Image (spheres, rainbow, N blue to C red):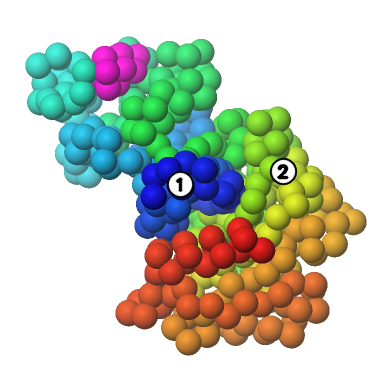
């Protein structure tokens, strides 16, 4: 299986949060050549504290995806546990900062059982974080893996790629995980009534349709008004998309995990160049970001977003098919198959939703369907 997976298909996923975690782990049995383009715009919780401290991109979803793709046959449980460890949610922030400083000690229990190479690398980056940690840093719920990534970002002259590559190697990641852009930005939206949302964490309370989704300059304390800024993908990302054997817009929070990844310039152009199947896995069940949209309306939003920079692209260059599961899934606002086909997109009814939970896609069944698409 490992030999076959090493030569497996080149899949590209435009993904953000946790919805793809289980599927990512299963996919490592089929291919080690998947590319996961992750949204780096999160602005809530412990991620917000890191972004305020260093003006950096969000790293939490990147860390989660690295761990989902880690080869557990090669990686020690201690290393995985270290990356996932968090400080308490409650507590005095001064005492918690002091606890972080105490973790610099070589003999601290947090370093116990780490492989020697990981210990040297992670502790060096953690030391860089502690050295530059602001006095007002809020450490509540801080993830040790995120702090290491932040320290590596600082150690490499505010470049994220070197520490990302090093952590990928230490975790034996079977695939590649990249932020869709490396610039620090906010996700923003103009809503139907003309009001604005600035900051991804506000989308959890989305109560009306989005008129316009866009990227805005990062601000430590974002206001309610902001301007759009352009973001560009790297040449490497563009090449990897164009050479894909499958492109997938997967299940996940509709705006913050899927559509946000399609905003940077260069994405749609690369997708048009790719000579491969391009599919959208529709959410099943409830998603607060879908604002009552049918599957057909979500297809329209995906196509409209991609056509911002590729206005003349026909649907078949951007999206071939939508996957739904009528038997096991739940689509509260309907599928509207005729409206999907009228946009030039096919509808495939396949068994991919968990038979016991309409909110969850079965990772094994979904992986097999994706592999079948790679053979088309």
Write the residue at 79% across / 63% down: 316
Write the residue at 14% across / 14% down: 106
How far across and how far down the image is residue 183, in percent?
60, 30
Most common SS among magenta residues: helix
Label 2, residues with CA under 10 Å away: few <14, some 14-19, many ≥20: many
Read off the residue under disc 2.
242
Asked whether, in this view, residue 207 is left or right of residue 237, the answer is: left
Q: Quadrant of the C terminus?
A: bottom right
How far across and how far down the image is residue 105, in percent?
15, 14
Label 1, residues with CA under 10 Å away: few <14, some 14-19, many ≥20: some
Q: Is 84 in front, or is 47? A: 84
Q: Is residue 161 above or below residue 78?
A: above
Read off the residue under disc 1.
5
Q: Say what secondary structure mark 2 lies in.
A: helix
Q: Is residue 301 above or below residue 136?
A: below
Residue 242 visible in the current orientation: yes
Write the residue at 74% across / 85% down: 338
Q: Is residue 126 above or below residue 321?
A: above
Q: Quadrant of residue 166?
A: top left
Give the Cα distance between marks 1 and 2. Answer: 21 Å
Write the residue at 64% across / 51% down: 245
Range of the magenta residues?
A: 117-128
């Amino acid at each position: 299986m490992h030999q076959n997976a090493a030569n497996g298909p080149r899949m590209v996923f435009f993904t953000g949060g946790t919805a793809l975690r289980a599927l990512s782990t299963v996919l490592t049995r089929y291919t080690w050549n998947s590319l996961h383009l992750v949204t780096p715009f999160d602005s809530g919780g412990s991620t917000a504290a890191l972004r305020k401290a260093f003006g950096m991109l969000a790293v939490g979803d990147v860390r989660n995806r690295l761990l989902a793709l880690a080869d557990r046959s090669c990686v020690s449980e201690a290393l995985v546990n270290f990356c996932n460890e968090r400080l308490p949610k409650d507590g005095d922030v001064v005492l918690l900062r002091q606890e972080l400083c105490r973790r610099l000690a070589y003999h601290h229990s947090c370093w116990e059982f780490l492989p020697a190479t990981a210990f040297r690398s992670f502790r060096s980056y953690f030391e860089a974080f502690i050295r530059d940690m602001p006095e007002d840093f809020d450490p509540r719920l801080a993830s040790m893996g995120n702090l290491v990534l932040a320290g590596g970002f600082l150690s490499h002259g505010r470049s994220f790629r070197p520490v990302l590559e090093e952590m990928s190697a230490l975790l034996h990641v079977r695939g590649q995980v990249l932020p869709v852009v490396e610039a620090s930005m906010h996700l923003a939206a103009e809503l139907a009534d003309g009001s604005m949302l600035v900051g991804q964490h506000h989308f959890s309370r989305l109560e009306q349709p989005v008129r316009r989704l866009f990227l805005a300059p990062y601000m430590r304390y974002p206001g309610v008004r902001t301007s759009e800024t352009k973001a560009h993908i790297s040449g490497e990302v563009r090449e990897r998309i164009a050479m894909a054997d499958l492109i997938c817009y997967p299940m996940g929070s509709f705006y913050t995990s899927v559509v946000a990844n399609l905003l940077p310039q260069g994405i749609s152009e690369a997708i048009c160049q790719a000579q491969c199947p391009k599919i959208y896995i529709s959410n099943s069940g409830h998603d607060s970001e879908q604002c009552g949209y049918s599957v057909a309306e979500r297809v329209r939003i995906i196509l409209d977003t991609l056509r911002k920079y590729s206005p003349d692209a026909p649907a078949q260059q951007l999206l071939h098919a939508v996957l739904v599961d009528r038997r096991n899934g739940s689509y509260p606002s309907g599928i509207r198959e005729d409206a999907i086909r009228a946009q030039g997109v096919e509808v495939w009814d396949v068994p991919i939703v968990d038979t016991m939970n309409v909110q969850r896609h079965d990772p094994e069944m979904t992986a097999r369907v994706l592999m079948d698409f790679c053979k088309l």
